[in-house]
Image (spheres, rainbow, N blue to C red):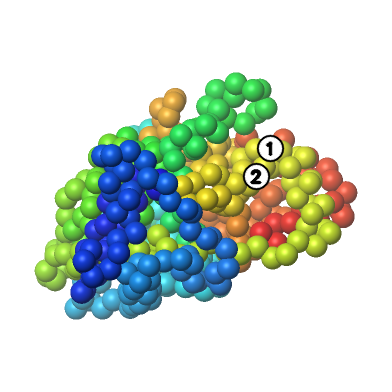
Amino acid sequence: MRSPIFLPIAAALLLLVPGCSRKQEHDPYEPELLAATQGPAPKPPRPLAGAHLGDPIPGLTRAELGAFRRGKVLFEKRFTPEEGLGPDYNSTSCSSCHSTPATGGSSRLYRNFFIAMYGFLPVLSKLPDVPSPVIPAYGPAVNASQVFTLEAGRVVIPATYNGLPVTVAQRNAIPLFGTGLFEFVSNQTILANADPFDGDGDGISGRANFDFGDLGRFGVKAQSNNIERFTRPPLFNQMGITSDPFLGSAGAASLSSLAVQATGDPDIPITDNDGIPDPEISKADLGDLIAYTRFLAPPQRRPFDAAAFRGEAQFTAIGCAKCHIPTLDSSLGPVEAYTDLLIHDMGPGLADGLQFGVPSPGGASTGSEFRTQPLWGVVLSKPFLHDGRAGSLREAVLDHGGEAQISRDAFAALAPEQQSAVISFLEHL
């Protein structure tokens, strides 16, 4: 049976498709909807293989495919101020930051954006005059504020505010290929891999992050629970596009919660004062945008050669697969993403000093914890790491620290040909 995260959203998406109803087209989710009250109804998993980069998952219904295609158009659409862009923004379209090597991917360094908050962990606050911790490059908050100015084309972020330190971090856009499949991985599967107190003594103590009660899966710090919460905040933070909830907390795996990045409760509208009526994107369009990310197919691995097979063995032998778990079970079948969807302390070298979500157990984040980045298609997402600091996969491996220090040092100790084999393995994923 499919994950309960997806079922109500799938039904709502179908209801929003013009001319589509249960009488006109068989509803593929009806068995699961009935199962919610009548018990499980077996359903074969969808095929996940065979899609080209940027394509939808194979096997979608006509209604799902229609929503995906409309969502892609919206994803690539350049919004204008007359349509609600701004007043503060970094980009004019979703694909501005998710276009490499295809729509839905990552971006080059010049598209990096800044997050800034002031105070001390675990209590951090957004800076004044900006709508969220994401610092806009354009808009009145940049141009009119006494705190922020535009100097030589760059936003100047203060080192302190009200006597408290300002913490600034860069972000490189996360590739979205296959991301929607994480909604089909159960909470139990994710939590089964957590070892918050390092009970087995291997130096790895991954823990779950929670979106104020709901288990996180998405984002650099696994701070967002589902695709709706992963979509609405960037729409507002990066483009200033306001929205009403599509399903709000009804789209979550468990409890209702607050959305990430200071956008407020998922059950209430996001608004601004740019003079354009809110919401600036309709519920139907928001549903299509959610469908696009949800149904975007994962990258397809290249056929392994001898070097890739040797590298795979080395990757496992030096402990990388303890966090980059090759396969997670899901209600759609195996998800071969090479992640555990948990957060891990990556050491002071990668630390950004920021916390989103509520890690558990143990409470506050250390400011150096990050979600295990999925490795499928990793070679397509250069530059690497959360801020794009690594120009090569080898650099990315050697930048690991904290819980990954032992594996990092083991990689550094390998003979050059063994290191090359590991990199070849990663390039084939």
Residue drawn at (47%, 53%) of the image: 44
Q: Residue 309: x percent and y percent?
A: 79, 54
> Can residue 75 be seen by looking at this rendering?
no
Task: Left or right? Give the position of 106 relative to 293.
Answer: right
Task: Left or right? Give the position of 213 relative to 222.
Answer: left
Q: Secondary structure at mark 1?
A: helix
Vertically, is 331 above or below 232? Answer: above
What residue did someone put label 2 on?
400
Mark 1 crowd level (few <14, some 14–19, many ≥20, 10 Å Cα): some
Q: Amino acid at mark 2?
A: His
Task: Left or right? Give the position of 182 relative to 239.
Answer: right
Residue drawn at (33%, 48%) of the image: 32
Which quarter of the rendered picture does the N terminus lie within? top left
Mark 2 crowd level (few <14, some 14–19, many ≥20, 10 Å Cα): many
Number of on-image labels: 2
> Can residue 8 be seen by looking at this rendering?
yes
Q: Are marks 1 and 2 in contact (CB under 8 Å)?
A: yes
What residue did someone put label 1 on?
405
Q: Secondary structure at mark 2?
A: loop
